[in-house]
Amino acid sequence: MSGILRLLLNRLGISLIVLVGVSMLIFAIARIIPGDPARIALGPNANAEQIASLRAEMHLDASLPVQYGHFVADVLRGDLGMSLYTNRPVTQDIAQFLPATLELVFLAGFIMVAFGLPLGILAARHRGRWQDHLVRVIALLTVSAPGFVWAVILMLLFAFYLPLFPIAGRISDIYDIERTTGFLTIDTLLVGNWAAFGSAVHHLILPAIALSLSGIGQAARLTRANMVETYEKPYIEMAQAYGFFPSRIARSYAFKPSLIPSLTIIGLDFAAMLGNAFLVEAVFAWPGLSRYGVAVILRKDLNAIMGTVLIIAITFLIVNIIVDLMIAFLNPRIRYSTRGAS
Amino acid sequence: MIRTLRILAANPLSLLGLILVCLITLAAIFAPWIAPFPTHNGAVVDFLNNNRAPSARNWMGTDLVGRDIFSRILFAYQISLTLGVVVLAIAVPIGTMIGLLAGYIGGWLEMILMRIVDVFLSIPPLVLAIAMMGVLEPTLTNAMLAVTAMWWPWYARLVYSIARGEREEGYVLAAEVIGAGAGHIAFREILPNCLPAIITKMTLDMGFVIIIASSLSFLGLGVQPPTADLGSMVAEGARYLPDSWWLTVFPGLAILVAVFGFNLLGDGLRDVLGVDE
C-alpha cells in the first residue's frame, strides 16, 4: 500500500507544479489580448472615469508579476471574477454548466472503453486476418473526423431519418427535476423518477456516441498493438504449449499487461473529449460548459474564459491522477513496491 | 525512398491513402482551374440557384446564397492544407530542438523544459487553441499561430522520449569517447534515429491539424466568411438539417476523406519505417 501512497503524493506534487504553470499560461493568454481589458469589459459607451475605476479594480495599472499575484490570490480564495456575459460570478456559472459536460464526457469515456478495448482484443487475437484489417479500417475511420462531423451524421441518421433519439437538449421538457448535483441521471434517481431518468439517458446517448467515436478508434488501435506485443512473450507461448484455449489465454494472460499502456491513453483521450465536447455540445444544443465557453469567447469575456480553461485543466489533472492510481493497482510491481515508483 | 514507396504501395490500404493524399493535394493546388465555378470561393451571390439539391450542374448542391458547394470544398482544401503545412513547418523544428536538448543534455534543462511541455499537454489541445483564438482576432494567421502554439509540445515529448533512450546506446558513447561535441551527437547521431517517428507523426498530424483547424472555424473562431472553409460550411449548414442535408454532409465528408487519406498513409508509413505506436 505504501507504494501507492508514495505514488499518489508524487503525482499530486507534479500536478501542483503543472497547475502553477497552467495558471501562468492562462494569465499570459489573457494578457495578449489587444486593447484595454477594462474598455472591452465596459463597452464603447463607458467614460474615462468608469474605465479608470475598473482598471484599478482589476489591478491593471500594477506590474505584470503583481497582477499575476492578484490573479492567483483570487483563484485560491475561489474567486474567478464576474462574467460579463451572464453578470454572475464565474464560479457560479461553472458550477451550473460543468455537470452537464462531465455527464456527457463520462458516458463517452465509458462507451470508448466498452467498445475500444474489445475491438482491440479481437484484432490482436486474429492478427493478420480479416477481423484485424476490419478493426484497423474502423479505427482509422473513426479518428478521421472531428466530433461535430460525427454529431451531424449521427443526428441526421438516428434523430431525423430514423427518429430513435431526441434531437437536442438534456431531458424532456415535461420533467421538472430539482437540481441537487446537476447530474440529471443522478438527480432523477434521487427523486425516484424513473421515467425522467429514462429521458435523461435517452438524451445522453447520441451526443455521447458522437463524442466517443474517435476515442474508440484510438483505444482499439493501442490495445491491439500492446496485446500483439504481449502475445510474443514466452509465458504466452508456454500457455499455448500447454494447450490452453485461445479465449482463456487472451482473458487470463494477455489482456491485463496490455491494459496498462491503454489506460494511459484513455487518460489522454479524456482530455481530448473535454475539448471535443465544445463541438458536440454545439450540434446537440447541450447546455454544458463548452457551450458556455464558446459564448464567453465570442464576447471576449476574459474572466469567464480564464475560469473555464482553468477548470478544464484541473479536471484533466484529476482524471490523470486517477488513471495513474488505477495503473498502480493493476501493476503488482508498483502495488507491492516499498520504494514507490516514479 | 523509392524502396519505401514500393513497400508502402504493396499494401492496398496504404496505397489508397497515398492516392487520396495525392488527389486532394492536386485538387487544392489546381482548384482555380478545376473548380466548376472558380469565383464561388468569395462573396458571390446567385439567388436564382440558391439552396439547390445535388444535380448535374452542381454535383454537391448549392449553398444558401447559390454558391457551388463542390467548388467551395476544393478551395477550402487549399486553406486546410496550407494551414497544416505551415503549422508543422514551425512546430516540428521547435519541438524537435526542445526534445533533443532535454533528452540528450538532461539535468536541470530537462527538468525545466519537460515541465513546460507538461503544462501545455495538460490543457486539452482544442481548449488551448480555442482560448487563444478567443483573445486574438479570428484570422487565418492567428489560427495558424494558435494551432502551432499547442502543437510543438507533442514533438518535444516524442523526440525527448527517443533521445533519452538513445543517450545510453553504444554508438552515442562511442561518439562521446572519440570526443564528438554535443551538437554533433544531438543532430548527427541521435536526430537521424528520431526521423522515422517524426515523419510518421507528421503524416498523421496533417490529418489532425485539419481536424483542429476545421473545429476552430466550426466554432466561428477561424477563417472568416466569405472565404470557404470546411468547418464553417458545416456550421452554417447545421441549422438547415435535415432538409438541406447537402450543406453539411458534403463538407463533413470532405474533412473525413482528407483526414482518412493522411491517416491511412501515416499508418502505412509507421509499419514500413518500423515505428512503435
Image (cartoon, grey):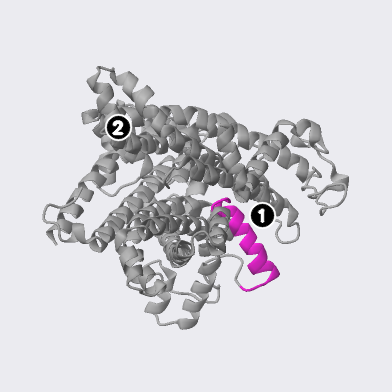
Residue at x-position 66% and y-position 51%: B252
Image marks 2 and 1: residues in contact by CB distance under 8 Å: no
**B3 and A130: which is toward the camera:** B3
Element under disc 2: helix
Give the amino acid at mark 1. Ala
Q: How many marks?
A: 2
- Chain that bears disc 2: B
Q: Which mark is residue B103?
A: 2
- Taking the magenta stretch, the answer to whether it contains residue A88 is no
Q: Can residue B3 be seen from the camera position used here?
A: yes
Q: Which residue is mark 1?
A: B238
Left or right: where does residue A147 sit relative to residue A163? left
Q: Which residues are magenta?
A: A143-164
The chain identifier of the residue carrying mark 1 reads B
Q: Cα distance, mark 2 to mark 1?
A: 46 Å
Task: Specify which label sits upstream in the sequence, 2 or 1.
Answer: 2
| Residue depicted at 52% across the width and 69% down the height | A205
Residue B105 rendering spot, x and y as whole percentages? 26, 27
Magenta: predominant secondary structure element?
helix
